């Protein structure tokens, strides 16, 4: 039965059939790693979304790299699944993928929730990316990241946010630093201590 399902994933013209075959193979514990690459590159976004969802089960570094490369996928549901999955992987590529999604999809509250759900595993990388991004990006994440850093006792995360604000060009340094200092005081971090 597994061989027939593998053939459905490889050759069926119907994306619904490919999705069902992937789910069944994963449940049977018969989904070969090489098939992940095919599913993650599928032309239909729902197939890619399901493949990303199940990729968390894979221990293959190559599969993980491919999933992380989908941080720029044109489909929002695929990117959302990537953001959620990045929190399960400690690798730097997952942190970079999460940061890319955080910046590109910062205006969407659902994406912000997914990013913050995965943020703990990549707090410093995410903080550096947020601090270097446009002010409107930093504004939507800064306080949540600070609260997480304080709650987890992670001074390196706070330092990454500060370093990013201080590294901004002279023209925008004050507009980057002032709200950060205000947020730090609001969450109980003494910026001068």
Image (tube, rainbow, N blue to C red):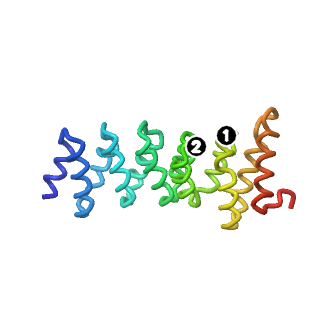
* Residue 67 position in % (x across, y down): 41, 48
Q: In which quarter of the image is the C terminus?
A: bottom right
Question: How far separated are the C-alphas under marks 1 and 2?
Answer: 8 Å
Image point 34% across, 56% down: which residue? 54
Q: Name the residue under label 2.
A: 106
Q: Which residue is drawn at 27% across and 49% down?
A: 35
In percent of the image, x 67 and y 37: which residue is there? 134
Residue at (22, 58) in percent of width and height: 24
Instruction: Name the residue nearer the viewer: 111 or 93.
Output: 111
Q: Which image quadrant is residue 159 in?
A: bottom right
Q: For residue 16, what is the image quadrant?
A: top left
Upstream in sequence: badge 1 or badge 2: 2
Judged from the image, the secondary structure of the residue bearing numbered disc 2 is loop
Q: Residues within 10 Å of mark 1 (few under 14, many from 20)?
A: few
User: Observer-nearest residue: 190 or 92?
Assistant: 190
Q: Position of residue 86 (x, y in %)?
A: 49, 54
Residue beneath label 1, please? 136
Residue most toward the top?
171
Q: In which quarter of the image is the N terminus?
A: bottom left
Q: Which of 191 and 112 is in front in this view?
A: 112
Which residue ends up furthest to the front in the rendered image?
109
Left or right side of 150 for 88: left
Residue 158 position in % (x across, y down): 73, 56
Near mark 2 (Cα within 10 A), the count class, few <14, some 14-19 or many ≥20, is many
Task: Give yes or no for contact between labels 1 and 2 (Cβ–Cβ under 8 Å).
Answer: yes
């Amino acid at each position: 039965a597994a061989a027939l399902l593998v053939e459905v994933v490889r050759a069926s013209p119907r994306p619904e059939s490919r999705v069902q075959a992937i789910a069944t193979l994963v449940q049977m514990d018969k989904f070969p790693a090489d098939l992940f690459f095919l599913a993650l590159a599928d032309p239909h976004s729902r197939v890619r979304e399901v493949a990303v969802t199940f990729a968390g089960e894979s221990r293959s570094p190559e599969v993980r790299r491919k999933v992380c490369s989908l941080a720029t996928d044109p489909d929002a549901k695929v990117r959302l699944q990537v953001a959620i999955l990045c929190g399960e992987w400690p690798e730097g590529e997952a942190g970079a993928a999460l940061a890319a999604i955080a910046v590109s999809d910062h205006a969407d509250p659902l994406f912000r929730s997914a990013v913050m759900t995965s943020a703990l595993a990549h707090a410093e990388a995410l903080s550096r990316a947020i601090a270097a991004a446009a002010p409107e990006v930093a504004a939507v994440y800064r306080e949540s990241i600070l609260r997480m850093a304080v709650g987890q006792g992670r001074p390196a995360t706070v330092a990454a946010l500060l370093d990013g604000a201080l590294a901004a060009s002279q023209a925008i340094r004050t507009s980057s630093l002032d709200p950060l200092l205000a947020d730090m005081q609001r969450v109980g971090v003494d910026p001068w201590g």
